[in-house]
Image (cartoon, rainbow, N blue to C red):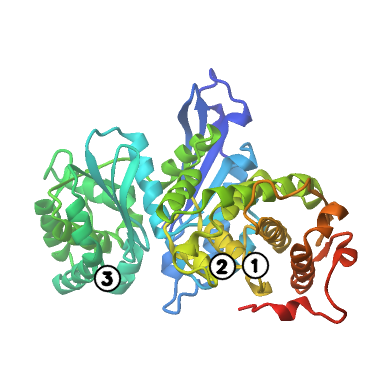
Amino acid sequence: MTHWTSADSSADTSNANYMAAVDLGSNSFHMVIARVVDGALQLLHREKQKVQLAEGLTEDLLLTEEAMLRGLAVLTQFADTLKPVPTESVRVIATYTLRRAKNSAMFLRRAQAIFPFPIEVISGQEEARFIYQGVAHFEHYQGRRLVMDIGGGSTEFAIGEGFQPLKLASRNMGCVSYAQLHFPNGRISNKKFERAILQAEQELEPIVSAYRETGWQQVVGTSGTIKTIRDIIVGLGWHPVCIELEQLLQLKDLLVAQENSLQLDLPGLADDRKLLICSGLAILIAAFNMLGILQMYYVDAALREGVLYEMSDRLHHHDIREHTIQSLIKRYSIDTAQADRVRRTALELFAQLRTSWNLTDEMADLLSWAATVYEIGLHINSSSVQRHSSYILKNANLPGFNQEQQQLLATLVRSHRRKIKSEDLSQFYLYNTSTVVSLLVLLRLAVLLNQKRRDDFLPELKAQGQNQQLCLQLPKAWLEQQPLLVADLQQEQLHLKKIAFVLDCPYLIECSLQSPGFDPASAEDDS
């Protein structure tokens, strides 16, 4: 085990202060361990292991067994190093390759056996946001700046001011994937460079207009590829501090003259970067050409630092996800009074069932957010609102939410009324099916009980539960005055029965006005 805990022994080394960010990139896996000292982050340990997951991604987008084994071996090492860090203070982010691989769920399941921390697969835009936050917290800049990060499988771009990103984009071009495609076995030629640059320029074309219109005063590059190119340029004495297009083209000519990258002997170029230098350079030249970049400075901070700073913010209750939800409320003119009613009811039931259903604070947050935005699709059409709402949540950019959290919100909202597709509830890696079902039941009941959209309608609610079962107690005298609600609750019993969940509500039969043989399920269009 790496003895990083010995650093700066004069400071408080309580494990409670430790936090770690792990970045499962397409080329390398990175780990950063830090602690909070007087409100500031102090980095204690960095670790990088070359894995090249993207190299193991086939044309059919399947991760090979060899690539999986390389990744699992590194996760075993990381797990040992992370033993002193509390589980809740470790955040693990997976990017392009696990985002794209069709069999990534297989890798994630195998990782669970040797790596005791949940792995979050994030979207490209979320990756770009973390990268921007890492740079913004690492080095202050007064004006607007463009940040670029060339990864193994994708390249991220962000424009922002201070800590606020304004534009975020992820393009499917990376130094590993382009090396395989354009520079196999390290072979170099001018024609290979031209093809790689052209493909990168085509990939960048959709974002060029919006990015140039937004503008910037400074350009920053991060991570290994851009650092290597900067180190070569500085090492050759071509520029003392930064990267310019003139030096990039000069470096391209130098590389073409060598014919094979394995023969290269350049200052700042490590052996494990030789096969990637040409592809990374081609992508960087394309970005300079298309975006009109004049100069680029290197900053030694990226995604994992952004993750650490966001974790630190969450410790102080500044959760970016809450800001995202508030933005959705404004953008889609959500009925906040009704959202508050549903949210309060859902959380009231959650609090009573938390222990018996083994629910957590994170579950409460996700339920609260789902209850807040369940009607987000009303501005499209009130008919099938659940489908419209789910579509928006599934496809919108939701800063702060990883892919599974975003998918969970969309799934809960999609099934907040009417039919439930059981197959939708078991598609998650971070959340087991019983948890998803529990949250869905609470949301459905909260929506059903607040259909009248009145603050003075509901009596005191009492709930008890166990696995796949809930007993909801409502006053008999009150139920006798609510024949439509009684019918709705009976119908809900049938819906939940189809996913093997038992909803018990005393007095329903006695209070029912239905005629014998009436089937509530047949009285509603379940589309």
Determine if residue 76 is in view: no
Disc 3 residue type (three-letter): Phe
| Label ID, residue 417 | 1
Q: Position of residue 227 (x, y in %)?
A: 28, 47
**Which residue is pictured at 53% across the width and 55% down the height?**
373
Q: Which residue matches tag 2?
A: 386
For the residue marked with disc 1, what is the amino acid?
Arg
Q: Residue at x 83, y 70 (%)?
A: 513
Of callouts 3 and 1, the N-terminal one? 3
What residue is rendered at 33% in x and 50% in y?
A: 224
Q: How many marks?
A: 3
Circle number at residue 496: none
* Along the line of sight, the residue nearer the viewer: 243 or 141: 141
Q: Estimate how packed mark 3 is, as few (under 14), some (14 to 19) or many (20 or more) residues with alpha carbons within 10 Å.
A: many
Screen quadrant of the C terminus? bottom right
Inter-mark Cα distance, 1 to 2: 7 Å
**As drawn, is 86 to the left or to the right of 519?**
left
Report the front residue among 22 and 453. Answer: 453
Q: What's the residue type where badge 2 is placed?
A: Gln
| Residue 440 occupies quadrant | bottom right
**Residue 233 pos. (x, y %):** 17, 47
For the question of whether residue 42 can be seen, the reply is: yes
Q: Are marks 1 and 2 in contact (CB under 8 Å)?
A: yes
Extreme top residue here? 10
